Amino acid sequence: MGRSAFSPPTGGAWFAALRVRRLAAVVCAAICAISNLGAGVGAALAAPPALRLAQGADPSALQPEGCPRLLAAAPRPAPVALRRDELRLTFVGHATFLIETPAGLRVATDYNDYVKPQEPPHVATMNRAHATHFTLRPDPGIRHVLRGWNPEGGAAAHDVTIDDMRIRNVVTNIRDFAGGTERGANSIFVFEAAQICVAHLGHLHHPLEPQNIRELGRVDVVLAPVDGGYTMSTADMLQTIQSIGAQLVIPMHFFSQSTLQRFLDQARERFEIVRSDSPVVTLTRDSLPLRTRVLVLPGR
């Protein structure tokens, strides 16, 4: 496994057209029902809000939010041990990254039943948007499950240090199916290890307010949803990325190469674009670019 990741990715579209969205949702529900009989899957699929189109989004940018895939696609080679100043990110797919620290801690973002690491992580963070961003039945081998919402009501509040990583959340709002807003019902998660701060924007539905930016603090790497519709319009996402001021931006939550390319075409006007041929990147604070760079990891 190399320590840099800068050349062309591979990958293709999940679905040919928006008209298959309903069929994809039916297939997704059927798979869940077969594999989880009696496990309350109906509640998992019905509980979250948020598939409503973002304000200002281009409807032609949308692709289905169905099951992207059930597991990470390929066997993963044995990881190379990290130095004390290194942090490793692997794009598993959709909105899930595996973040690994020098102490061997493994954290999975937006952990769910469909797109997940092949081995259970030590820590799982989850987003309330819909069933490809959370699970009601996390693997029992996961030591810590951090939800971006509070199941008992009110806002979630996390600020924990686990091994050599600090994990905290910044509360955000979320759209519901009726187009309303649930305030404080979701989160951005911030991961701090090896002197690097990574912010996973999750299924962010609104531009950040100055208070959100202050709460985020310094961010070196931002993992940003670039679908251009289910979360935010591309213009709003680019403005959000610019307001955060991270040195490295890694796109996620895109449903085809055309959707990704639409984002990159607009991002290129502001930022350098670099493509990788590996879904894995090992970072150090010294290796971060001086000016904001968009690093595209292969996947979808």
Image: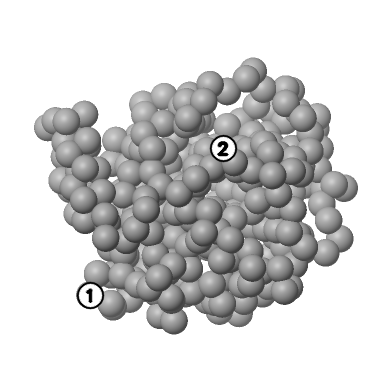
Q: Is residue 188 visible?
A: no
In which quadrant is the N terminus drawn?
A: top right
Q: Is residue 43 above or below residue 173?
A: above
In depth, the one of 131 and 22 nearer the eye is 22
Q: In the displayed orientation, state which residue is furthest to the left.
A: 38
Q: Residues within 10 Å of mark 1 (few under 14, many from 20)?
A: few
- Could you tell me how far apart the alpha carbons at marks 1 and 2 are, in whole angstroms? 33 Å
Residue drawn at the location 33% of the way across and 44% of the way down: 67
Type of the residue with mark 2: Leu
Is 40 displayed left or right of 103 in the figure?
Answer: left
Q: Give how far across and how far down residue 151 sits, in percent.
A: 29, 54
Can residue 43 be seen at all in this image of the molecule?
yes
Residue under label 1, please give it. 178
- For residue 73, the mark is none
Query: Residue 160, relative to residue 238: is it above or below?
Result: above
Q: Nearer the viewer, residue 23 or 94?
A: 23
Q: Which residue is mark 2?
A: 98
Task: State the image coordinates of residue 20 (x, y, percent, origin top left).
Answer: 26, 55
Pointer 2 local density, CA inside 10 Å: few below 14, some 14–19, many at least 20: many
What is the x, y in percent for residue 141? Answer: 41, 24
Helix, strand or loop at mark 2: strand
Q: Is residue 218 above or below residue 165?
A: below
Q: Residue at x 41, y 47 (%)?
A: 14
50 left or right of 99 in image: left
Kind of residue sitting beneath label 1? Ala
Q: Residue drawn at (63%, 38%), measured in percent from left and top?
A: 279
Lower position in the chain sequence, tag 1 or tag 2: 2
Q: Is residue 201 above or below residue 80?
A: below
Question: In the current view of this chain or complex, which residue is farthest to the front?
Answer: 16
Q: Residue at x 72, y 30 (%)?
A: 102
204 sits to left or right of 288: left
Determine whether the residue tagged by mark 1 lies in a helix, strand or loop.
Answer: loop
